[in-house]
Each structure stands twice: as structure tokens, then as C-alpha cells.
Amino acid sequence: MDTAAPATATPDRHLFDGVPDEVSIYEVGPRDGLQNEKVILPTERKLELIEGAVQSGIKRVEITSFVNPRWIPAMADHLEVAAGVQKHEGVCYSALVPNMRGLDGASRAGMQEVAVFMAATQSHNRKNINKSTEDALQTYKAVVGEAKARGMRVRGYVSCVYGCPYEGVVSLDDVLRVAEGLLELGVYELSLGDTIGVGTPRQIEHVMVGLLRAGIGLEQLAVHFHDTRGTALANIVVALQHGIRTIDCAVGGLGGCPYAPGASGNVATEDVVYMLQGMGVKTGVDLDKLVGISGRLGAQLARELPSKYLKAHLGHCARLGKPPS
Ligand code: HMG
Ligand code: MG
């Protein structure tokens, strides 16, 4: 099968032929979104954010990370968040774990899904998880094995897929090595992270085609774009044209890795949902409810959030003189 999207549309072949009818939104706002904020939200507010996301129709939420609070102070309340979440049937709650200690915490808190994370590059792995790429894979071998033995599902992240803050250009071979390494350990899905938001559409095509040609299944892939340079939505369209069905995003456009200098927020959930709705792709997410959450978050974090849809919504409400959602 030729996995490359057609370069041009023809009367019989359209650029959007490969786009799925339905997409799963994987909300990372409570974790990626909040891990790098100056204002640390109290646990109660985090729980409201998670519940609000679920009430808006989101079925997959990354709620926290069981990492060292000295490294990521904003996630120090991971146990309280995991224990306090109101669980809804049919909703999947996940949390990042970097090692066995993290897995133990997540498991004690009743998490049924966790995510392991590492970069395609040595330098980012050293800075972010204090390990070489080989040591990270070795650590995760034990973590994923133990998680599965405990009946948990494990997701995997490959960071710095399109560029690294320390090494610059990243080769497809390095991405493949980590992607295949994590899949061999038994992660059910791989999220491809543009950690610093440098990727552009042709690069997305190059990586997607490279991974698919190496035999990685579409159903095993998700995309995770930080929108530092404004290319996230264009990149998502390319991923959709290749048939991607899972998109990571953060409400309000919050987010960023403290160990990836220059990284800004994840693509905003409401911007993605708005675009998908317009393209006729179902997400099951209520945009009004979603924008209500990001509006409140902006006030709680005392800053203007990057979401374009939120800005348009607030402007529209102000012009009409009506209160925002
Ligand atoms: P380390 O210092 O090498 O760990 O950190 P260690 O094993 O040598 O232990 C040192 C101390 O940390 C010990 O405590 C351990 O108990 C403690 P002490 O004896 O000194 O009091 N420790 C822990 N405490 C709590 N929870 C734990 C834990 N493990 C050890 N799980 C470690 C290694 C991985 C722990 C550290 O580097 C760390 O926590 N890193 C997390 C970094 C992080 O969370 N970054 C952001 C997430 S990644 C991201 O945002 C990218 C992503 O969004 C995708 C994308 O955008 O591309 C996923
Ligand atoms: Mg991220």
C-alpha cells in the first residue's frame, strides 16, 4: 500500500480521502498543560478541570505524572489527583510514570493506564529523565512488564520527533529505534511528540510514511504537537490525511516541557475540535463546554491562554455584550 498522501488532488482522488470519520481526542491539559505553569493550580481546581473535560465529552485524559516533585513541582499532588478523580465508565484516565517508583504510586492510586515517555535523542533523555536512551528503554522494559502484570495498559511517548532543543535535527532512524523499542516492550499506542513545536507538514509526512513503511500500524500511532511556531494545525491535517485517529491536545493551548527550552503550549483542544467539526470529523466533544473550561482556566492561571478559538469566542461575546460560556 502506498502510504503517502497524494501531492495533488485529481477528480478521482481527493486530498482528504484518507481522513477518518471520527477522531479520539486525548486530553493532556491536566498533565502537560499544567506541568510548566508559573501558577500551580490547587488539587481541587485540577479535579474540576479533569471533570470538566470529561463532561465536555472527552474520553481520554492524562491527569497527572508520578515523577519526582523536585523535577516537576506542579505535579507533586499526583496521589491526591489520582485518588480524587471522579471515575466515569467509558473514560480512560492515564498518568505519566518514569520508573518503577512512579508505577508503584500510580498503581497504589488505582490508575489502570499509565504512559512511559522518552525522547528520540540522547541529550533530551539525559536532561528530562536523567538517563541515556538505552537505560531508559531498559528501565521501561521492567516498568511496562510490571504494569502489564498488574493488568494496566501502557501508552508510550517518543519526544523530539521533529527536532531536539539540544541536538537540533533528529533522524528518522533515531525516531524508529525508540518507537520500535517501546512497541516491543508492549505499549499499545505511541504518541509522536513535537516537543518544541518545530515540525512542518512535509516532515510530518516523512515521519508518518517512515513509521508506516517500517510496519508500525496506524492504530498504534497518535500525534502530539506543541504549537510554538503555529504549525500544529497544519501538521495535524497532514497526520489526518495519513489516517491518524488519535490527537493529543490541551485545553486552552496550555503546556510545555520544562526540560525543553523554548517549548510552548500544546495545540489547543478547542482549536482542534473546531477544525475537525468543520471538516465533518466527529470527536464527540461539546465545543461550548470546552471553551467554558479554558475561559475559567485563563482566570485561574492569571494569563491569556493561547487558544485561538477561545480568543474568538471571548471577542464575539464581548461584541454581543453577553457573558462567555
Ligand atoms: P533521578 O534523580 O535520576 O532519580 O531522576 P533517582 O532514581 O536517582 O532518584 C533520585 C531521587 O528521586 C530519590 O529520592 C528517588 O526516590 C526520587 P531521594 O532518595 O533523593 O529523596 N524519585 C522519585 N520521586 C518521586 N517519583 C518518582 C521518583 N523516581 C525517583 N517517580 C526521574 C529520574 C525520572 C525521577 C526524574 O528525572 C524525573 O522525575 N523526571 C521527570 C521529568 C518530566 O516529568 N518531564 C516532563 C514530562 S515529559 C514531556 O513533557 C514530553 C511529553 O509531553 C511528550 C512531548 O511533548 O514530546 C510527554
Ligand atoms: Mg508534550
Image (cartoon, grey):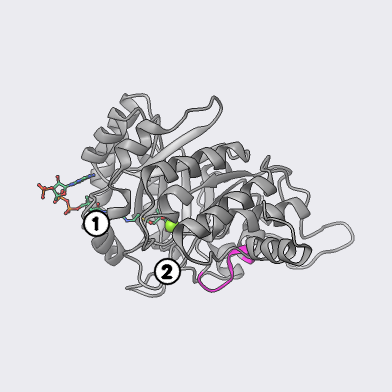
* Residue 233 locus on image (x, y percent): 63, 63
Callout 1 amino acid: Trp
Give the magenta range.
228-234
Q: Which residue is mark 2?
A: 263
The answer to whether mark 1 is within 8 Å of ligand 1 is yes
User: Measured from the top left, where is residue 161 in percent x and y?
Assistant: 44, 62
At label 2, the amino acid type is Ala
State which tag comes first along the sequence, 1 or 2.
Answer: 1
Residue sitting nearer the eye, 241 or 31: 31
Q: Nearer the viewer, residue 254 or 297?
A: 297
Residue 22 picture quarter = top right
Q: Splitting the image into 4 quarters, where does residue 73 fall?
A: bottom left
> Is the shortest distance between ligand 1 and the CB of mark 2 under 8 Å?
yes
Q: How many marks?
A: 2
* Residue density around tag 2, few if under 14, some if 14–19, many if 20 or more, within 10 Å: many
Q: Which residue is mark 1?
A: 71
Indicate the secondary structure of the residue bearing disc 1: loop
Secondary structure of the residue carrying numbered label 2: loop
